[in-house]
Image: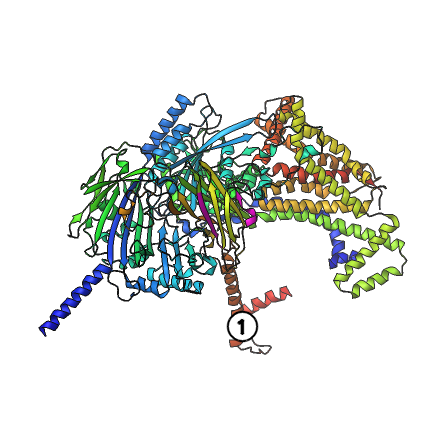
């Protein structure tokens, strides 16, 4: 008996040990001041799942998500829910960019034959998982990017990845607490311990920009990539405005409403990185002092990172920065590539979408621009102009798939070579169309959202670049990670057009009119049906009122 | 058509009645229209304003504006800056504005624009606008509101706008740290009054100057590279200097943008110590902002404790009796109508309207304002930056609540007081009555020539034919009757060629082409003038006078040139009918867009239209006198002469002490300026007035003149 009990304990211990070994959880915060007035906070929670096959036996990884992944045979999945607009021109580049509203794209395994059905199922399932309206994703707002998106994870060589890819964005989606709560439930410590306890919806929804995301991909376990691991990365990006929080000095208490109650006990690594490069020009002191400061040289730009190792000892930590002088007027350095997107023209007949790309760099940059116009905004390839020219030598390659009414969006992809120190304008025109009256959304006069364009670029310099290298999982990987190219995918700002909208108060008026008519008709009908006509014999005595009435009657005759 | 083509209708009762009563009936219609218009000022004929858009929620927020001190500081600094550095130059203090706005942490941009003056010797004007964008948190910059102020130099003859700019900056400072904004706010300071605003708006909406004039650029910005008409290829000898006049306003490009603009508030405050705010609403081509916005501004002025006015209607004055109210309402409305006729906006807000943006101007006025004294304005309490700021905050926060664009309430209305309005359904009957008068006249003319024609055919045809036609048309369906109707007429053409539609049509077309040519003539006239070193306004004005005189003399002979024989009574009557129909259609369609302009055209031309008839040779002295009277009337309503006469009379009103000659010279100078302004406005801003007058009204006038000067044989 004793031996059996011992064996049982041993086996439990071994299982626990094995599972701890197979699932790995790390949490990180990256903070970066964005001069002059903003502060960028980026949270990432990485769970590495070793055994990708056994989605039913998970330890740290969220089972609800891994089940979805394995059920729908998803190779790679990116879902972001964003409120606000990342302003690349002022703020530089985020670690992971996201389109305003909801954005979902996924690569399915090559075994999946009917990708569209699988895609529809996946989006509907995720819609339930994150309480977002992802179920509105359908064929009419889904595209298959040809050049703009590439998998971040490990892919078998020789595999056709493009045909297994689906991309959709819902720019009208409003992101709020109801999305954050299910998102937090996926974390091993939920929101009770660890970094995620800082994600207090009261505070983070008051930021200028917030974006939550789930990124699932397969990464190589070893250098030869014979085995793969599933990496589930949950991210939150926040941008605070010093003007709105009322001072340049920030602290966790000010930003999140509370201090940090230590690390999550289940995490193998809990680190906070603070970009203190701007400390040289805009002196501030961090309290408490960081455990170490790393200097990273990457692509010709030096970055200083202050690192805090947080332990799960349950002690409250309140990291903050205090500026030494208040009179500084810092100037932001414009990033090498920035862009602007807007709608041309006015009126309800014709319009145009302009995407302006500015290359500040000393060398030319190749970018892929993906314009994804909904079916009610028919863009015509014939009206495409790059810098006002129909046949531009800047366009290296182009892909256009015309939309179909109520079935398929318009999809245009251009591979453009941006000359050094120049601005390139891509203009494409559209005609306004009439919708059927039931197709108008509520508040039809609010306008219709045009989603962001995707811009995918290989930057030659790492100025303003904060993304992790493609093989990296945690922030240590950015230290001295110089490469030839720094790939990044941007989302431009969206736009709004007001389609010709009928006067929706008219049906109301018609109802009023119809009701009046019915009401008027009802009285006489009711009278006829319920009252009896009585024949009155002549010569009966008439009352005084009757006499008066008769008097008028005679006059009329 | 069944009624009109019925061969028997000559004897139908209504035709006989119409023939007898059409004169008095038309006169009654005309009178009725004027009376109706007069009645609109009465409270029984107009309505109290109300909020149609519930999302505005006006005045529900607690005002928090606390920037009074900073507004004062901005004001003093701005005036100091202007006095120190910009005392003798008419330039916008770009560095100061950019510096202040960036200190407030707005996204600041400058915008350069160029005007190549279309007439004259190729003058080039340059200007700069400064704007700062307050990005609303948590939004992706899809919608925006604009707060603008024109910059006016110290030596400008107009009132300054320093306090408006200071208030705007103080408001920006107050609004920047607020987290409730759902729409971006663009703070815009424009140079060169409306020119800067037009340039900024065109640049914001991506219109380019290579898209010809503003009219054609409306839709053609999406089609670059359309071959334009090259005039020099037709007349190589003549030098079309400045041939690229079409690109007169180069709006330049904007570096920073926000989303689609929902509403705009333009501030014109000279000093914070104003007595009341005048809310200006009239826009380009008589377009008006949504009534909800106007109403919102008035209501929030009341709430913020600021006196406000609209033309003759002052918030602090209430009529003692109904008659007072009526007269006040009428004069407010009349004033509004008169100022809308020319279609020139009375502030920078007016240019927003054509881009589908609702906008108003708030102008601060003191007790002794250039616009005229307001009654009892001295006794009002003086406003200050705090109250103005609170009012601006309330307006913008209310607009911030707006979920949809302004689409409810009224876009076509007249205001009879700050809180009373007349909707399109109430004022249109007066214009319709005028047009109905013209249409009745046309119908009666049609009836009479048809009958005359019938009598003629009756005379020529054998008597056996006509009963047959009668019988046929009685039995046949109405659609076939048309064929029957054409038959006798064709016969009569064949017989004595009394009716040739082709000849009339050619004349009609030619006259309208002349109008089109006159519309395009100012450029040529100014170029001819430039050869003799005359200023362009002189050359254009006198050129137009010369063209008018030539046309007056030549056009009566046009129909004779176009056909061999003499013109007949029927043909001229048909021209008259077409003319009446065209005039009434023009009045109605113009009136739908710009009611005052349509009404003015109708009021001026209806008497002539009702009196005008084909002149028959012979007749007594009385008839000759009547003819002379009609011809004089016709000459008087010639567009150019009418404008000149109006200006002379107006200068008489303004300067009653001057002699006749001074008056005429002053008046003609004013008319010259007015003509020039309307031409330039049409080229830069797309004002219709000049184009409408030359391309539509002038041909109509020429046709009237032809009818009155050509004498024909009696039928």
Q: As rendered, which of A553 and B406 lies closer to the eye?
A: B406
Asked whether residue A190 appears in the rendered view, the answer is no
Q: Quadrant of residue A335?
A: top left
**Chain part drawn in magenta:** A366-389
User: How far across and how far down the image is residue A102, in percent?
Assistant: 38, 54
- Give the vertical position of A211 relative to B678 (above or below): below
Q: Quadrant of residue B3?
A: bottom right
- The quarter of the rendered structure image containing the C terminus of chain A is bottom right
At numbered mark 1, what does the secondary structure look like: helix, strand or loop?
helix
Q: Residues within 10 Å of mark 1 (few under 14, many from 20)?
A: few
- Give the vertical position of A327 relative to B412 (above or below): above
> Which residue has dot 1 on it?
A525
User: How far across and how far down the image is residue B500, in percent?
Assistant: 81, 47
Residue placed farthest to the right in the image? B462
- The quarter of the rendered structure image containing the N terminus of chain A is bottom left
Residue under the point 17% across and 67% down? A12
User: How far across and how far down the image is residue B217, in percent?
Assistant: 58, 41
Disc 1: host chain? A
Q: Position of A433 compared to B619: left or right? A: left
Asked whether residue B155 appears in the rendered view, the answer is yes
Q: Position of B148 compared to B631: left or right? A: left
Q: As rendered, which of B358 and A220 lies closer to the eye?
A: A220
- Give the vertical position of A524 relative to B237 (above or below): below
Q: Position of B559 compared to B109: left or right? A: right
């Amino acid at each position: 008996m004793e031996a059996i009990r011992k064996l049982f304990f041993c086996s439990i211990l071994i299982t626990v040990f094995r599972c701890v070994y197979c699932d790995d959880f790390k949490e990180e915060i990256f903070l970066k001041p964005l001069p002059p007035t903003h502060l960028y906070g980026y949270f990432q929670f990485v769970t590495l799942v070793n055994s990708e096959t056994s989605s039913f036996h998970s330890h740290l990884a969220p089972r609800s998500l891994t089940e979805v992944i394995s059920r729908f045979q998803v190779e790679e999945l990116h879902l972001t829910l964003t409120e606000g607009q990342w302003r690349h021109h002022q703020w530089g580049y985020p670690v992971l960019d996201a389109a305003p509203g909801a954005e979902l794209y996924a690569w399915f395994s090559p075994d999946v034959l009917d990708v569209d059905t699988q895609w529809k199922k996946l989006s509907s399932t995720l819609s339930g998982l994150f309480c977002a309206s992802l179920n509105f994703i359908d064929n009419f707002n889904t595209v298959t990017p040809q050049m703009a998106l590439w998998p971040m994870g490990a892919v078998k060589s020789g595999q056709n990845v493009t045909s297994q890819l689906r991309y959709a964005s819902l720019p009208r989606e409003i992101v709020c607490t109801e999305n954050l709560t299910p998102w937090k439930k996926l974390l091993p410590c939920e929101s009770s311990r660890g970094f995620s306890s800082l994600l207090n919806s009261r505070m983070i929804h008051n930021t200028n920009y917030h974006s939550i995301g789930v990124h699932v991909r397969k990464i190589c376990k070893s250098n030869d990539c014979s085995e793969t691991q599933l990496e589930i990365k949950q991210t939150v990006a926040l941008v605070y405005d010093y003007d709105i929080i009322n001072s340049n000095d920030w602290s966790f208490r000010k930003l999140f409403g509370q201090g940090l109650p230590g690390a999550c006990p289940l995490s193998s690594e809990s680190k906070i990185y603070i970009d203190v490069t701007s400390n040289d020009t805009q002196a501030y002191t961090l309290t408490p002092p960081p455990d170490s400061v790393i200097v990273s040289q990457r692509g010709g730009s030096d970055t200083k990172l202050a690192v805090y190792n947080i332990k799960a000892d349950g002690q409250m930590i309140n990291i903050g920065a205090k500026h030494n002088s208040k009179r500084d007027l810092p100037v932001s350095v414009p990033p090498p590539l920035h862009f602007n997107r807007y709608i041309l023209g006015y009126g309800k007949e014709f319009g145009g979408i302009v995407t302006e790309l500015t290359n500040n760099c000393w060398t030319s940059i190749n970018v892929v621009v993906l314009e994804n116009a909904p079916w009610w905004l028919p863009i015509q390839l014939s009206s495409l102009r790059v810098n006002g020219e129909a046949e531009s030598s800047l366009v290296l390659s182009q892909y256009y798939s015309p939309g179909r009414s109520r079935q398929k969006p318009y999809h245009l992809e251009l591979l453009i070579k941006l000359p050094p120190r120049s601005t390139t304008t891509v203009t494409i025109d559209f005609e306004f169309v009439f919708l059927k009256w039931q197709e108008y959304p509520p508040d039809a006069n609010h306008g219709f959202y045009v989603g962001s364009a995707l811009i995918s670029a290989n930057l030659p310099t790492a100025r303003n670049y904060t993304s992790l290298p493609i093989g990296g999982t945690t922030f240590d990987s950015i230290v001295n990670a110089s490469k030839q190219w720094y790939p990044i995918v941007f989302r431009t700002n969206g736009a709004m057009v007001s389609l010709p909208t009928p006067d929706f108060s008219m049906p109301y008026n018609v109802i009023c009119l119809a009701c009046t008519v019915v009401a008027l008709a009802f009285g006489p009908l009711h009278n006829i049906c319920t009252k009896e006509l009585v024949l009155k014999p002549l010569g009966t005595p008439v009352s005084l009122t009757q006499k008066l009435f008769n008097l008028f009657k005679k006059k009329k005759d | 058509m069944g009624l009109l083509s019925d061969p028997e209708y000559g004897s139908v009762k209504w035709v006989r009645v119409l023939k007898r009563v059409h004169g008095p009936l038309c006169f009654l219609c005309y009178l009725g229209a004027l009376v109706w218009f007069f009645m609109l000022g009465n409270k029984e004929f107009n309505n109290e304003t109300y909020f149609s858009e519930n999302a505005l929620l006006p005045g529900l927020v607690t005002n928090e504006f606390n920037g009074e001190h900073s507004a004062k500081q901005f004001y003093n600094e701005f005036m100091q800056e202007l006095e120190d550095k910009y005392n003798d130059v008419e330039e916008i203090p770009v560095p100061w504005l950019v510096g202040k706005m960036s200190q407030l942490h707005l996204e600041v941009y400058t915008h350069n624009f160029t005007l190549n003056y279309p007439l004259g010797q190729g003058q080039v004007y340059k200007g700069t606008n400064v704007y700062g964008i307050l990005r609303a948190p948590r939004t992706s910059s899809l919608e925006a509101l604009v707060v603008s102020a024109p910059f006016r130099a110290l030596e400008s003859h107009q009132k300054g706008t320093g306090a408006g700019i200071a208030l705007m900056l103080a408001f920006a400072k107050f609004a920047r740290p607020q987290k409730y904004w759902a729409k971006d706010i663009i703070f815009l300071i424009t140079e060169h009054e409306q020119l800067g605003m037009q340039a900024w708006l065109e640049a914001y909406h991506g219109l380019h100057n290579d898209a010809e004039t503003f009219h054609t650029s409306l839709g053609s910005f999406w089609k670059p590279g359309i071959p334009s008409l090259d005039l020099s290829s037709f007349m190589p000898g003549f030098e079309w200097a400045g041939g690229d006049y079409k690109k007169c306003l180069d709006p330049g490009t904007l570096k920073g943008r926000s989303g689609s603009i929902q509403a705009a508030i333009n501030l014109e405050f000279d000093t914070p110590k104003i007595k009341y705010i005048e809310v200006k609403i009239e826009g380009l081509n008589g377009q008006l902002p949504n009534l909800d916005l106007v109403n919102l501004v008035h209501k929030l002025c009341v709430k913020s404790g600021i006196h406000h006015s609209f033309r003759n209607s002052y918030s602090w004055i209430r009529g003692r009796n109904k008659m007072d109210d009526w007269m006040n309402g009428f004069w407010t409305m009349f004033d509004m109508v008169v100022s809308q006729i020319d279609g020139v906006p009375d502030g920078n807000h007016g240019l927003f309207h054509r881009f589908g943006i609702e906008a108003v101007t708030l102008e601060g006025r003191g007790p002794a304002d250039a616009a005229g004294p307001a009654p009892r304005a001295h006794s009002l309490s003086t406003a200050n930056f705090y109250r103005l700021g609170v009012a601006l905050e309330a307006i913008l926060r209310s607009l911030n609540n707006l979920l949809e664009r302004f689409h409810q309430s009224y876009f076509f209305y007249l205001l009879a007081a700050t809180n009373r309005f007349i909707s399109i359904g109430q004022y249109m009957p007066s214009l319709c009555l005028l047009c109905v008068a013209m249409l009745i006249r046309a119908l009666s003319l049609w009836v009479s020539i048809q009958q005359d024609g019938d009598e003629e055919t009756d005379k020529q045809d054998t008597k056996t034919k006509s009963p047959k036609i009668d019988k046929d048309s009685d039995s046949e369906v109405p659609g076939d009757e048309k064929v029957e109707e054409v038959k006798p007429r064709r016969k009569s053409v064949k017989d004595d060629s009394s009716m040739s539609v082709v000849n009339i049509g050619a004349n009609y077309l030619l006259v309208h082409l002349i109008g089109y040519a006159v519309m395009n003539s100012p450029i040529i006239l100014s170029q001819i003038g430039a050869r003799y070193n005359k200023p362009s306004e002189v050359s254009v004005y006198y050129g137009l006078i010369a063209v008018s005189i030539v046309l007056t003399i030549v056009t009566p002979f046009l129909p004779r040139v176009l056909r061999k024989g003499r013109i007949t009574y029927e043909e001229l009557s048909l021209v008259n009918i077409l003319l009446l129909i065209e005039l009434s259609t023009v009045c109605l369609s113009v009136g739908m867009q710009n009611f005052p302009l349509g009404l003015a055209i109708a009021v001026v031309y209806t008497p002539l239209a009702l009196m005008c008839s084909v002149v028959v040779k012979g007749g007594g002295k009385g008839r000759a006198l009547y003819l002379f009277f009609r011809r004089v009337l016709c000459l008087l309503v010639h567009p150019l002469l009418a404008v000149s006469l109006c200006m002379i009379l107006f200068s008489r009103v303004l300067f009653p002490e001057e002699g006749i000659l001074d008056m005429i010279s002053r008046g003609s100078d004013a008319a010259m300026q007015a003509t020039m302004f309307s031409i330039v406005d049409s080229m830069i801003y797309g004002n219709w007035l000049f184009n409408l007058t030359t391309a539509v009204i002038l041909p109509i006038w020429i046709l009237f003149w032809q009818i009155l000067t050509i004498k024909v044989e009696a039928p």
